[in-house]
């Protein structure tokens, strides 16, 4: 095994059902797929890590598989944060410069952001992302970068995405036990948006729903910025469990039934169709019976999404509609339920294709993983540009002093 490759980017998603690792490198400035690994998760309960040992072993197994494919040491990664504990907060703060106008500096922006983030949070909350929605300069809204502009008052509208500190630390500790240093974290819905949204959708207003096994994470973009984030303790496993309970079958058989015959709209299923199920012996039931179990759950999920959007003040800001990602997003009829409940158009979000990436990774269940890679790449490019700018300024200072 060779030493660490400097341009290699690795991301880790510890999900309720599966633990996934994806690796890519930079080839002439573009991301190129190198490897991925998927193993069954362990030690998870309701979307959170309940046992560190089994969870870490699953991460180690996925990391080792990816390492053998890339043939270089993998010792660091970015991790995704999700689960039912994520919530967003919007806040505003400003600076007065007196009667005389002056040029806005980076320090002024930093001070305004720090004042805005000073909102009181519960003791166990950690800030995942500080995201500026807009700056307002002398009552002029909609400014994205005020540095260099002139004014007498600067305000910032800030969105803070927060999570449980203990839940976040559990994911980091799990990765550490598997021999991986965590370089950064990202909210999974924001990552999914990175891989599925267009610039026009972000501008017009769009909601991304990342529907996992035990929770659904959501993010809303409006006028190009994040306006709302949240999480709902409800996912694809709830659909499966309902089938298992009502039809008195194993969870494994219920999952197969959902994938093969599931539908979220009763009237879309022919009334006289029959299907064979095992509970445990082969039995014939009406096909519509499956939809009769799944549709109420689908409507309950979208009702919860609607309440989250309403509480966040963004229900009427979805000009570009709703994008569904995650493994449970492909349930037939779920788009129809989404459109009828939220009164916007909806589509399935498939991740963008990276160079040499296998076609299997274009499935909605991989949107978060691919998006994490894109997010990590963008962050690295931004840091490199900032470092180069700083080095250039230092060279100029030293040159002037000679």
Image (tube, helix red, strand yellow):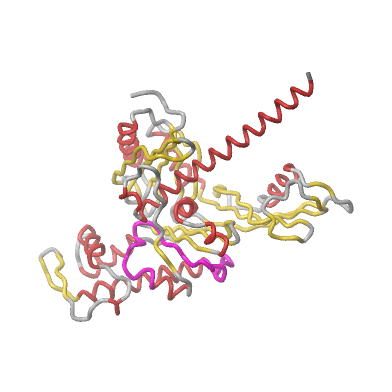
Tell me: residue 306, above or below residue 47.
below
Q: Is residue 254 left or right of residue 46?
A: left
Q: Is residue 159 left or right of residue 234?
A: right
Question: Residue 357 appears at what percent x and percent y?
Answer: 35, 44
Span colored in magenta: 309-336
Picture quarter with the N terminus: top left
Picture quarter with the C terminus: top right
Camera-nearest residue between 20 and 232: 20
Question: Residue 53 appears at what percent x and percent y?
Answer: 34, 38
**Outermost residue toward the front in this view:** 28
In the rendered image, which quarter is residue 240 located in?
Answer: bottom left
Q: Is residue 178 left or right of residue 197?
A: left
Which residue is found at the position 39% from the left and 38% from the top?
Answer: 23
Question: Residue 314 appears at what percent x and percent y?
Answer: 57, 67
**Outermost residue toward the right in this view:** 99
Q: Is residue 343 left or right of residue 153?
A: left
Camera-nearest residue between 162 and 201: 201
Residue 225 forms part of the magenta stretch = no
Which residue is found at the position 25% from the left and 60% from the top?
Answer: 255
Which residue is found at the position 47% from the left and 67% from the top?
Answer: 305
Question: Residue 363 appears at what percent x and percent y?
Answer: 34, 54
Tell me: residue 304, above or below residue 64.
below
**Outermost residue toward the left in this view:** 281
Query: How many marks do you count on the picture?
Result: 0
In the rendered image, which quarter is residue 349 located in?
Answer: bottom left
Residue 322 forms part of the magenta stretch = yes
């Amino acid at each position: 095994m060779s030493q660490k490759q400097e341009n290699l980017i690795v991301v880790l998603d510890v999900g309720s059902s599966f633990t996934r690792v994806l690796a890519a490198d930079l080839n002439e400035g573009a991301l190129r797929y190198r490897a991925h690994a998927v193993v069954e998760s362990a030690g998870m309960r309701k979307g959170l890590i309940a046992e560190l040992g089994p969870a870490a072993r699953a991460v180690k197994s996925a990391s080792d598989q990816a390492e053998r494919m890339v043939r270089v040491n993998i010792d660091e990664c970015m991790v995704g944060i999700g689960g039912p504990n994520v919530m967003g907060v919007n806040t505003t703060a400003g600076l007065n410069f007196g009667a005389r106008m002056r040029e806005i500096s980076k320090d002024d922006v930093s001070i305004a952001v720090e004042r805005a983030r000073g909102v009181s949070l519960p003791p166990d909350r950690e800030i995942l992302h500080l995201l500026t929605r807009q700056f307002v300069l002398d009552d002029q809204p909609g400014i994205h970068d005020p540095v260099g502009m002139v004014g007498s008052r600067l305000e910032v509208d800030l969105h803070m995405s927060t999570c449980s500190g203990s839940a976040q630390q559990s994911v980091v500790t799990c990765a550490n036990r598997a021999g991986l240093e965590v370089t950064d974290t990202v909210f999974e819905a924001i990552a999914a948006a990175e891989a599925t949204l267009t610039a026009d959708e972000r501008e017009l207003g769009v909601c991304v729903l990342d529907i996992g096994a035990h929770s659904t994470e959501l993010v809303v973009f409006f006028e190009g910025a994040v306006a709302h984030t949240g999480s709902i303790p409800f996912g694809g496993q709830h659909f499966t469990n309902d089938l298992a309970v009502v039809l008195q079958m194993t969870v494994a058989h219920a999952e197969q039934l959902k994938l093969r015959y599931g539908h979220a709209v009763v009237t879309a299923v022919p009334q006289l169709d029959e299907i064979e199920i095992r509970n445990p012996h082969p039995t014939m039931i009406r096909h519509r019976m499956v939809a009769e179990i799944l549709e109420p759950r689908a409507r309950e999920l979208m009702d919860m999404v609607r309440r989250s959007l309403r509480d966040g003040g963004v229900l009427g800001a979805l000009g570009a509609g709703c994008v569904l990602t995650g493994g449970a997003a492909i349930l037939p009829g779920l788009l129809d339920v989404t459109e009828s409940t939220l009164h916007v158009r909806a589509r399935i979000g498939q991740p963008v294709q990276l160079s040499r990436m296998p076609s299997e990774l274009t499935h909605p269940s991989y949107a978060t993983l691919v998006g994490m890679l894109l997010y990590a790449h963008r962050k690295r490019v931004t840091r490199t540009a900032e470092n180069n700018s700083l080095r250039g300024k230092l060279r100029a200072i030293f040159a002037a002093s000679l």
